Image (spheres, rainbow, N blue to C red):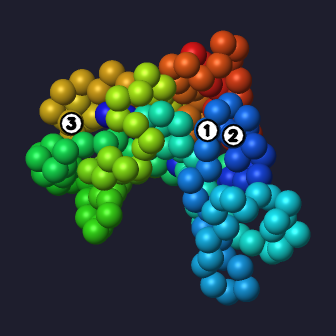
Amino acid sequence: MLFHYHFWTPHVEETERFYTNNGFRIYQRIGKYQGDFQNFDPPFVWDDFREKDILFRIIEARKGCINVTFGYGKKSIFDHIGFLVIEKEQEFICQNAVNLNWNVDRGERRTFITTPYSFRIELQTNKDLVDSVTDNIKIGELRLEIMKKGLEGDLSILFGKPVNSIKSIIGETVTIREAVIKDFSSNPLVDPNGVRILN
């Protein structure tokens, strides 16, 4: 199940505000302050630390079956998408990635697959990264702008079946152009990183 996307952004506070204004809750904030990584999780709010020189590594927002993360970057850069899988699926997908000559980085908490399309795919078996795995609020589809053809075919090989939740168009950058999120808002909205969100 597609459940996650991550951006690096210069608009950290604005991105958090956008998602919380649309029903997401902030689960965690981790930032580098005075040389050390520290947590600034709720109940802390921006008024508590806005004046401090914090470089946020990750802010995690959750709603239903969706987990959106973002961290500070000098410009908005789409980094990865994530899928919740069971361990058996993860092994199958990782072997398919090796067969495609894609790099597989297995970590203790998550696995990243580097694609030739300038973004990564996270495989996650830990279901507690979402508030619910059965909620109707979920990512129905992500429409990616990428710079080369072949993504949908390669994803079918990677997952051993078509991945209907990912569509691509060819352009001059790599980013998420649109996210179809069920029960998000009755009107199309655009987040601070240029992601157009449709219901």
**Residue shown at 83% from the left, 73% from the top:** 52
Whole-percent x, y for residue 159 in the image? 21, 36
What x and y, as percent, mark residue 54?
Answer: 75, 72
Considering every residue shown, the one lying at the far bottom of the view is: 35
Residue at the location (43% across, 22% down)? 136
Q: On the picture, is 162 further left or further right than 168?
A: left
Q: Which type of secondary structure does the marked residue at label 2 adopt?
A: helix
The CA distance from mark 1 to mark 2 is: 5 Å
Quadrant showing the C terminus: top right
Label 1 residue SS: loop
In the picture, the disc for residue 159 is: 3
Q: Check disc 3 and report its element: helix, strand or loop.
A: helix
Report the amino acid beneath label 2. Thr
Q: Earlier in the sequence, mark 3 or mark 1?
A: 1
Q: Residues within 10 Å of mark 3 (few under 14, many from 20)?
A: some
Determine whether label 3 and label 1 are within 8 Å by CB.
Answer: no
CA gap, disc 3 and disc 1: 29 Å
Mark 1 surroundings within 10 Å by alpha-carbon count, few (fewer than 14), some (14 through 19), many (20 or more) = many
Identify the residue under disc 2. Answer: 20
How far from the left and from the top, in percent, is residue 123?
30, 50
Of the pair 65 and 195, the residue shown nearer to us: 65
Camera-side mark, 3 or 1: 1
Q: Which mark is residue 165?
A: none
**Would you say the residues marked 3 and 2 are in contact, meaning their CB atoms lie under 8 Å apart?**
no
**Residue 126 seen in this snapshot:** yes
Q: Which residue is mark 1?
A: 24
| In the image: residue 156, left or right of residue 21 | left
15 up-or-down from 103: above or below: above
Q: Amino acid at mark 3?
A: Phe
On the question of residue 7 being in view, the answer is no
Q: Quadrant of the N terminus?
A: top left
Are the residues at dot 1 and dot 2 in contact (C-beta closer than 8 Å)? yes
